[in-house]
Amino acid sequence: MNSIGDFWRVAAWAGGGAFLASLLTAGLIVGTRGRHLHLTGDRPGDGPQKQHDEDTPRIGGVAVAAGLAAAAGIDAACLGASLRGAFPAGAMGWLLALLPLLLLGLTEDVRKSLSVRLRLAVAIACGAAAWWLAGVRIEALGIGLVDAALAHASWLSLGVTAVAVAGLVHAMNIVDGLHGLLAGIALTVLMAVAAVAWRYGDLGLFSAAIVTVGAVAGFAVFNFPRGVLFCGDGGAYLIGFVCASLLIVLVRAHPTVSPWFALAAALHPVTETLYSAWRRFRAGHSPTAPDARHFHSLWSAWLAVRQARGERIWGGPNAGAAWRTVVFAAMPPLFALGFETQTYVLQVICVAYVVAYLAWTKRLEQAMANAERSASTRRG
């Protein structure tokens, strides 16, 4: 069992170092935007999901990566390399699994032309590499027959892990649609991991979660409430990969923690991704086609209608919808804390959240439909 002093020392030095390095890097990117915006800029109108009004750098993932790198250096130099304990087969193998995905995301942030299939394939390959090189392995799903199969078939564990990692990587990219939204959702996931790791005395996992909190928070200063720097695909992939890895390792390292806790912690991006794919398929579109009908997009559009009617929305529709969505998305991980070993309770939490998500989505869709009909009537 590690001492409370060890935990606070890591939080103060490694977490603080990650925050400061991320903050300074983000500030440098924003301060020099005139020199690189022609390459790194995200332009309004480039896609139906875009909700910003001016060219904005979309390489915030560089700041998050800088924060993690700084924390790793501080950890190795001053804290006894506590981060190494986060991954069963070592942090170096995990880093090797992560790098191709991060580089691919940053390439897409500059070129904006890589196919969805290529990015999904690389994410799956990196998930498989994390299984092989770092011991990031799903060995149970909290479902009897499936768990028995996973225990006796390593190839099945490899496949499930690779798909799960790739799924959360792309789910985090989908919820990167408003100022502070991805950062807020990621922070709730990471704090849930840190809380359980603290409870189990797991310094390695706690360290990894806290330094990622610091790195994401440093970037978020420039992303909310005004979005002067976007996370981009590189940042979303990095954050998604870290969150997926830590959730998987948490369950593997502490078998009493239910796999359903991991699902509850990341339930909003998972639900958003699955529902969006089904909604598009039902409408005859590709499941990967971008649109402006996501949960957060609808909420932002509805706040814009309310603002046009004279209602004051703090931060405007973009930031206003972001913090509201983060509060909504934080409910499953918050309710799951304290019940991380109780599968049936966690299943109830997950089902209840999906029902609430669908009900609120339908309400937003109906509100927007009514607003559009009213606007059409006035024009007629």
Image (spheres, helix red, strand yellow):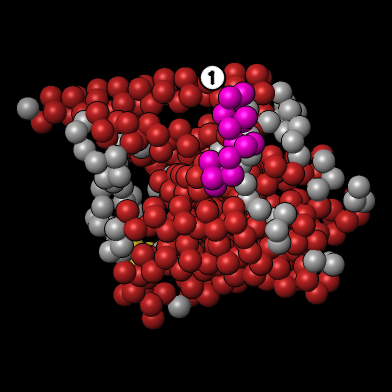
Res. 345 visible in picture = yes
Q: Residue at x 53, y 21 (%)?
A: 351
Q: Is residue 339 left or right of residue 380?
A: right
Res. 23 visible in picture = no
| Residue identifier under label 1 | 352
| Figure disc tally | 1
Q: Is residue 251 left or right of residue 154?
A: right
- Determine which quarter of the picture holds residue 310: top left
Magenta segment includes 362 = no
Magenta segment's dominant SS is helix
Q: Residue at x 50, y 35 (%)?
A: 268
In the image, farthest residue toward the bottom? 35
Magenta segment includes 156 = yes
Camera-side residue of 134 and 213: 134
Residue segment shown in magenta: 143-158
Instruction: For mark 1, give the secondary structure.
Output: helix
Q: Is residue 277 left or right of residue 29?
A: left
Q: Amino acid at mark 1?
A: Ala
Q: Residue at x 59, y 44 (%)?
A: 154
Give coordinates of residue 252: x percent, y percent.
70, 42
Give coordinates of residue 335: x percent, y percent.
66, 27
- Determine which quarter of the picture holds residue 16: bottom right
Camera-side residue of 235 and 28: 235
As drawn, 7 above or below 300: below
